[in-house]
Image (spheres, rainbow, N blue to C red):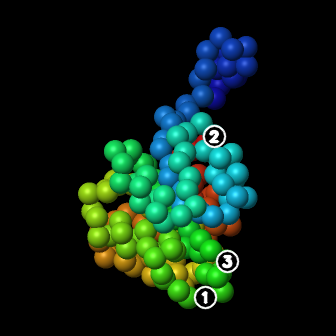
Amino acid sequence: MSIWSGLLNKLGIVDTQSGRNPICIFVLDDDARRHRWFQKRFQQDTLDMVETVEEAKEILAQENKYDAVFLDHDLLPEHYEGETDDEVTGYAIAAWLAANPKIQPAAMIMVHTRNADAAIRMVEILRGAKRQVEYVPFPLLEQRIKNYWKS
């Protein structure tokens, strides 16, 4: 930004910063701290957050078109130590999205669980369905988001 543009921007005469258009984000996660993180990170965007598989199916099946879908695997304390892919984990949503290609077909899916083994299973089923997906452990999520969407 030039000195002149910066001065005009500071004086409020013209906004020369090249922001981005708001995006639509969907999050499946049971952690309230992560909910606050997503709310802060995407405060200028449309953000829908749910904690259960049933809520996720209900919201994702609607006409809303999401730019990004963030999925956690471990949604209950008993999943934190195990390797279970049951009907109440993020894997259930990954499998459901893989089986329903017309639901959120253009969304970038990011699996953000710390459970690497489960994340790999989720990514594999989604890639097998030709979905745009990647695994990004939660601690690395901020940097990856910046690669896709400028703040």
Q: Label 1 sits on what residue type?
A: Gly
Q: Amino acid at mark 2?
A: Gln
Q: Which residue type carries mark 3?
A: Pro
Estimate how packed mark 3 is, as few (under 14), some (14 to 19) or many (20 or more) residues with alpha carbons within 10 Å.
few
Tag 2 residue: 43
How much space separates mark 2 and mark 1, taking CA atoms? Answer: 34 Å
From the viewer's side, name the closer residue of 146 and 27: 27
Residue 107 is situated, as x and y percent measured from the top left of the image, at 39, 54
The answer for how far apart the CA atoms under marks 1 and 3 are is: 10 Å
Q: Which element carries disc 3, helix, strand or loop?
A: helix
Q: Position of residue 77 (x, y in %)?
A: 67, 77
Q: Quadrant of the N terminus?
A: top right
Residue at the (36%, 69%) spot, across then down: 96
Callout 1–callout 3 Cβ contact below 8 Å: no
What's the residue at 36%, 48% (across, down)? 62
The residue drawn where x is 35% and y is 66% is 97
Q: Report the residue marked by disc 1.
A: 82
Q: Is residue 102 left or right of residue 127?
A: left
Q: Earlier in the sequence, mark 1 or mark 3?
A: 3
Residue 64 in the figure: left or right of residue 88:
left
Say which label, 3 or 2, has the lower sequence index: 2
Q: CA distance from mark 3 to mark 2?
A: 28 Å
Q: Which mark is residue 128?
A: none
